[in-house]
Amino acid sequence: MEENTKKSTAASRILAEEKPIDVAQLISGYLRYWQWFVLTLGVAMFLSVVYLKVNKPVYRAVASVIIEDEKGKTSSKDAGAFVDMGMLEGISTSSIENEIGLVSSRRLMTNAVKALGLNMVYYSKGELFGFESSKLPIKELYKQTPYKLRLVRLDESKLQQAIELEQHILNIAPIDGGIVIEQNGTDSKPTYKVGDVVNLDFAELIVEANEKIDSTEARNSDKFYVKFLPVEAVANGLRNQLGVSLVDDNSTLIQLGINNKVPEKAQDILDQLVFEYNQEAIEDKNLIARNTAFFIDERLKIINSELDSVESGKEEFKTSNKLTDIKTESSVIIQNVSDYNNRQQEIATELEVTNAMMEHVSTNSINLLPANMAVGESSFGMFIDEYNSLVLERNRLLKGATETNPLVVNMTNQLLEIKENIRQSLISTRSNLRITRDNLRRQAGILGSRISEKPSQEREYRGIERQQNIKEALYLFLLQKREENSLSLAAKAPKAKIVDEAYSLGGRVSPNTKKVLGVGLLCGFLLPFLVITGKRIMDNTINTREDIKDRTEAIAILGEVPHITSDGPTLVSGDERSVLSESFNILTANLKYIIDTEGTADGKGKCVYVTSSAQGEGKTFSAINMAMTLAETGKKVVLIGADLRNPQLHRHDNSGIAEQGLSTFLTKDDKGVFEYIDTSSLHADLQVLPSGPIPHNPIQLLRSEKIGPMLEELKEVFDYVIVDTAPSMILADTFLISRHADYTVYMVRAGRSKKKVLEFALESYAEGKLINPLFLLNDVNWADAGYGYKYGYAYGSDSNKKWPALLMDSIQRGASSFLGKFRNKEK
């Protein structure tokens, strides 16, 4: 007992020591699963190739434009009417950020989709390794079909219903001079020629020939499909792919980019988007010019009427007073006052224009102000042009938002403030002009006193002529501005100057072949690596002899019994060099070596207990085969069934539970133990003491004093006494008789016994409950087997097999070992 305690203490120290990591062993643990690595790598690379085949390459097209920078800039053509008045300040035009937002807006993209007909997708079924399938991604035929359908009318609501019924796809088959159209969900297949109208529930189309495809053979090519999609959905999808960025913060050069599976389609989208942007900018400018023209025409009507009235009054005055040429009579005085009169005319003209502007500005509505109406300083027209630009920007916002939108409200408040500033500026200007006019009148009054002696007709005539000159000057001024406005309306430069038209970058953007293959290669390697590593981390069972050695070296490992296939032998045979026989030959040799090494050979036989932690770990299987192997060597062996609760020896010779045996011997005193021993039907040299009938009180029987003398008596006769005992971890039966053993073979089943079993065995050893324990690892996977089995089984019955047969045997053994992991049945 003291010696066992010392051994268990040493075992505990060894268990607590950390062993260095054996890199070679760690790598070899993964290399033995090389088939799985090769398989997963092959599958991963195959899936990568399939991914590259299925997912069509995506290309990128880019274009560069310069946006006309209107910040701080005015145009005498667009706002010439107020340029010279100098009454507006501080109004700025749209910034470059706003223009970028406009280029990428949904409205422009929707217009581009409608113009290019991108909501009609021409395609053929996807192909993979030469096979067509509707489940594969489609192959788009952009501008590659011999015939095309020009959309005339589209009903979005009915199209949505057709999409829900899957009737939005047309199957088109070209024939001589026309096409056959079959709509999904319908049975009709009408034929159409070029120019015919195709009427659908949701659309009206016209058949056209693709001018880029001229050959008759091409026009009679394979069928293709046309899918109708909602315009808004297509526009939103393209907007998500569109990228608009400012090349430099100090410039107005922007770059547009978009990804698409068809390079030509991507280029057309960018070019059309730039065109739509320029068209909208021109329409905005034309809107200002048209409003200005309307204002000028209205003023011309009024001035023309007033001018006619003045000239008629002048004619009547001369006729009634019989005047011919008053200038000749008063040339001297007129020469003196001509400068004042000219100045009064200018002031009166400016007052007239100012009053007209006051009438237009005094309204509370936010409308465009007339351009090309300016007198006085030249900066006034700049402010009118800037105000109109802000009004246009607000109108663009209102197309996608309500008047309660914070941006719209903010811009409305800004416009009202600016308009109030314009009105105040006009009031100030008018006041200044009136003061100047009054001063001129006073000066003219002084000169008038000098001609007071002249007839009253002269004074009245001069008043009529002055009114005539004012009206004529204003009339000519409006005519000039109308012509300038007409010229600006006719010639409008594009706002976005194209630097580089849309072009493809050449190489595809995605999928990246190298990246996909690299990821496939990495996944193919990592997947089995992670699975194996995870399995090792999560696995708390004992699988190899290294799992035992890593936790204790105090208890030796007697041997290993490899996994036996379900169709293989379960008992050793002396005339067969099977895996099972070889494994138990090595096991018994190790047992004899241990007995000889420890010097316990005293002429008496040895009592060897065979136990385990739980049921189903191969205890009885190993006890029988070990006993048969020892008997085969010529030793006298007796096998005792000491598991009185659940006897299993009878199952291996297909006999029932013996009517007499160990339980009978322990109960009765009328017979000796040898009278209960019979020769085994499994081997002629093997004697068996069966467990006998199952008693009601196995614990009381095992506590009997007859156990020790019985074993000693048997050891005098037999070389080996093999005792098949009950499981030690769940029953106390084995510990009641454990002191009579010379050696205890503790069964551990690979893939089933938990690692905590080793702690239980060590604790039992330390407490003296197990005498000279030896581990026996059962049901070991071939890949996990020790060196004795990795190299030894090429001899014997398999040594004459050719390599194909050996390879097939290896595959079968590997499969059986894998399936054996899930077998819980005791051998």
Image (spheres, rainbow, N blue to C red):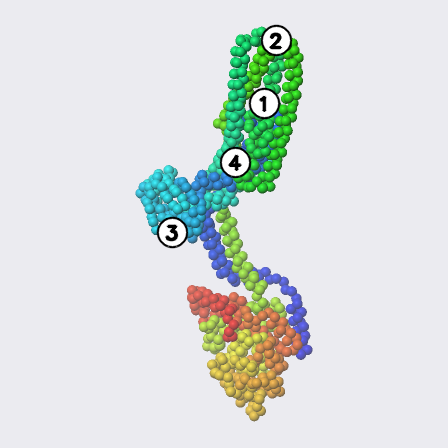
Mark 2 and mark 4 in contact? Answer it, CB < 8 Å.
no
Q: Nearer the viewer, mark 2 or mark 1?
A: 2
Q: Position of residue 24 (x, y in %)?
A: 57, 61
Task: Identify whether 509 is placed above or below 713.
Answer: above
Q: Position of residue 335 (x, y in %)?
A: 61, 10
Label 3, label 2: how far apart the Cα atoms are: 101 Å
Q: Nearer the viewer, mark 1 or mark 3?
A: 1
Label 4, label 3: how far apart the Cα atoms are: 45 Å
The one of 120 and 639 positioned closer to us in this rendering: 120
Mark 2 and mark 1 in contact? Answer it, CB < 8 Å.
no
Label 2, label 1: how far apart the Cα atoms are: 30 Å
Q: Which residue is mark 1?
A: 352
Which residue is pictured at 58% across the width and 35% down the height?
A: 95
Q: Nearer the viewer, mark 3 or mark 2?
A: 2
Task: Identify whether 630 is placed above or below 327.
Answer: below
Q: Position of residue 782 (x, y in %)?
A: 51, 68
Which residue is pictured at 55% across the width and 68% down the height?
A: 543
Dot 4: few (<14), some (14–19), or many (≥20) neighbours within 10 Å? many
Q: Which residue is mark 2?
A: 454
Q: Nearer the viewer, mark 1 or mark 4?
A: 1
Q: Which residue is mark 4?
A: 64
